[in-house]
Amino acid sequence: MRRKHIAVIGAPMDLGAGRRGVDMGPSALRVARLHERLAELGYQAEDRGNVVVDQPESSPTGAPNAHYLQQIAHTCARLADLVESAMDRGHVPVVLGGDHSIGVGTIAGMARHFLKQEQRLGVIWIDAHADMNTPESSPSGNVHGMPLACCIGSGPKELTSLAGRVPMVRPENVALVGLRSIDEIERLNVRGTGIRAFTMRDIDERGMTAVIGQAIQAASAGTAGFHVSFDMDAVDPAEAPGVGTPVPGGLTYREAHLAMESICDSGRMTSVEVVEVNPVMDVANKTAILGVELIMSALGKRIL
């Protein structure tokens, strides 16, 4: 994170979600003074606009166990190109979602950039949900429950192959933080992969400092750095009501900021995305404002 140029990329997609509205997340985050806040920290921000997204009203739903898979794969491929280009130019990608299936595109672009340098990428995935379903295990068929599985090589080839190598990220270099809602078969998927999964109980018992420290260690081991994918439903709905799939008992305001501040302190973050902001469910843009604040903490904002 010695780079001072930011590439802001919007991914206004809700094809992977079961509830409409997160396609407005990038606009809500921009309205929450993202660019002004980046400038206050001394960054030069270039807004690359939004990736082109197919609209569900004009698209076939597709297979019942992987809704809109082809359209999601096309969008993620376009997003991967934008992210890879930003990294190649020396910019830090800040990606604004959209549902969490966009994470496949972001990570594919990052992995492709480091593959050209014969280096690996790590991932810290902060989320209430594991996002480790596959079409075979998904009870809903919503692809936003599958992206982390795709990134470690398990899932439809339309998504797993986007980085040019499978897996995009080695499971041992993935840390999942804030987990508290998981499907029964998905639980087996998490246990069998080798990713480092930290539940809310881990945070309750050991504290965020210890948990995020271990997450950083796992995502940094043998890698060029790590991407941070922050689903706003990781935060408790009292602080972040405007999300696609709220779950009680999440991160507190300060736990979320401590995680991002610690990530910044590590000096190992390569890129960051904030996803699942749903203005339809929000109160006075509260969730988007918090999302921008968390991005600022990851990029160096401090109290003193």
Image: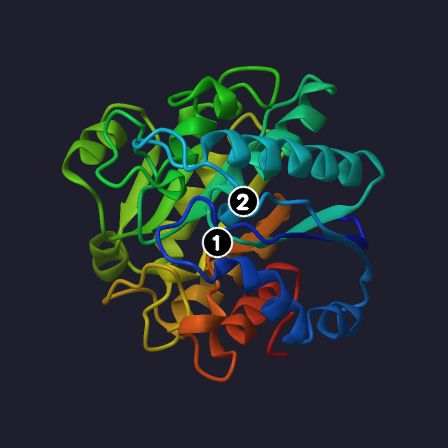
Q: Position of residue 229 (x, y in %)?
A: 51, 48
**Between tags 1 and 2, which lies in front?**
2
The secondary element bearing badge 1 is classed as strand
Q: Residues within 10 Å of mark 1 (few under 14, many from 20)?
A: many
Is 141 located above or below residue 154 in the figure? Answer: below
Q: Position of residue 32 (x, y in %)?
A: 63, 75
Q: Secondary structure at mark 2?
A: helix
Is 86 rendered above or below residue 163? below
Tell me the residue that label 1 is attached to. Answer: 230
Using residue 222 as the reference point, say whether residue 3 is left or right of it: right
Q: Position of residue 171 (x, y in %)?
A: 41, 26
Residue 296 makes an appearance in the image? no
Look at label 2 and name its amino acid. Answer: Ser
Q: Residue at x 73, y 19 (%)?
A: 116
Residue ID at (68%, 17%): 118
67 sits left or right of 207 in the view? right
Q: Is residue 161 left or right of residue 301?
A: left
Q: Is residue 155 visible?
A: yes
Q: Mark 2 or mark 1, which is nearer the start of the sequence?
A: 2
Question: Which residue is located at x 60 percent, y 39 percent?
Answer: 106
Mark 2 crowd level (few <14, some 14–19, many ≥20, 10 Å Cα): few
Q: Quadrant of the C terminus?
A: bottom right
Q: Mark 1–mark 2 contact, CB under 8 Å?
A: no
- Residue 109 occupies which quadrant of the picture? top right
x, y (%) of residue 71? 54, 35
In the orientation shown, which residue stands out farthest toward the bottom?
A: 284
Instruction: Identify residue for label 2.
Output: 58
Mark 1: amino acid: Phe
